[in-house]
Amino acid sequence: FDGFVPAAIFSAHIVPIDQMDITLMARVSDGIDAGATLNLTTGTYGTGEVGSLRPLRTELPGTRLQTGLPMQFGLGVRYADRTERRYRDPEEAGRVTGRIEDQMQNEVWDIELDLVYTYNGAVKDFVVTPPDGAAANLCEADGTDDPDGCISRFDAPLPGQLPLPHGWRDQFSARLGADWNVIPGTLALRAGSHFETSGLNSRFQIQDVLPGMRLGLHLGATFRFDMVDFSIAYAHIFQWSETVSAADANYRHVAATGDVGQCEAVPGDDGTAYDPGRPVTDRGCYPQGFGNPVNAGTYAAEFNVVSASVRLHFR
């Protein structure tokens, strides 16, 4: 848990003509340095036969997670076919005339284009730092059905830092949408689409929080009854499948005693320790503590999203 991540958001709103709005946005953020409890399971694929490892869990409070966060820059342009001119100070106009600046009431239709560029260059490795002297518990199975049956238990010391490489790529997204007030102040229909490029690095791609390349189609409507707006929306999102070959795969599973893919030793660096100034995503090799690649395969997804909302207006 990181209770304070400083961030700054800058924006500008420009109205060159009464029918048009232009917005600019930028968001920058500090990275995450969070405290957590790490749960390790060793022997996950053990058979339970004599001499094989049996799954055993180790809990390590006091672990830390560190990573950078993306920056975002956006441009939005909106054009509306207005039935009434817009006041420079809608609140003052409302106090004098009782008029409310309401897009469903004061516009026939509008169309909006939003462009967003996400700089993901700060997101390289998610670095997990176990507490000093941490070790993973292992259980050598005794061949019985007893889940706790061990011939012996022993510890495998963990490396001081475990980098989980991500190496996210920069992303670009475009969103286009329009509203049509079929019955002004009562019924509005809307439609739109969006496209975003993939932010995933194929060498280190896993089932991540970041999406692949996507195209979305959206429909919606709002019905107003007196002081209440009822809105519904539907979206179908297509995501391009991405295949990571065995030759390109380089996201390796944590193995406390492993040295597969370890960086070569050079004078002054034996390759076993992690260097934060040279992340795995840049070097392509790992410190001591990792095994074989586990991310080869095809990644695919598709989504249907339905939403509904109720909004209450106060006079």
Image (cartoon, rainbow, N blue to C red):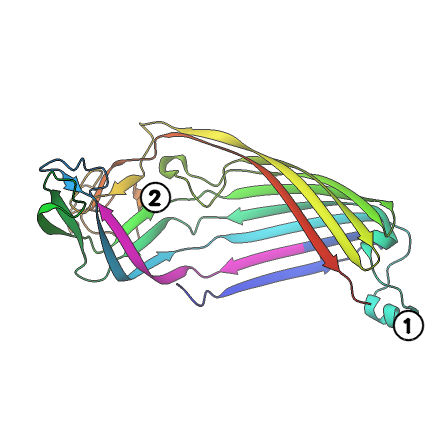
Report the residue that reaches farthest toward the front: 145
Q: Is residue 233 left or right of residue 79?
A: left
Q: On screen, 48 above or below 56?
A: above
For the point 41% across and 60% down, which residue is it? 32
Residue denoted by label 1: 96
- Tell me the quarter of the image containing the C terminus: bottom right
Is residue 29 in the magenta section?
A: yes
Badge 2 or badge 1: first in the primary sequence: 1
Q: Nearer the viewer, residue 163 or 304?
A: 304
Report the residue that reaches farthest toward the left: 151
Which of labels 2 and 1 is toward the front? 1
Provide the residue span drawn in magenta: 24-42
Is residue 100 in the magenta section?
A: no
Q: Is residue 266 left or right of residue 127?
A: left
Q: Is residue 173 left or right of residue 309?
A: left
Secondary structure that dominates the magenta span? strand
Residue denoted by label 2: 281
Image position, residue 116 (x, y; %): 60, 47
SS at circle 2? helix
Q: Nearer the viewer, residue 104 or 165?
A: 104
For the point 46% across and 42% down, which residue is it? 169
Image position, residue 108 (x, y; %): 87, 47
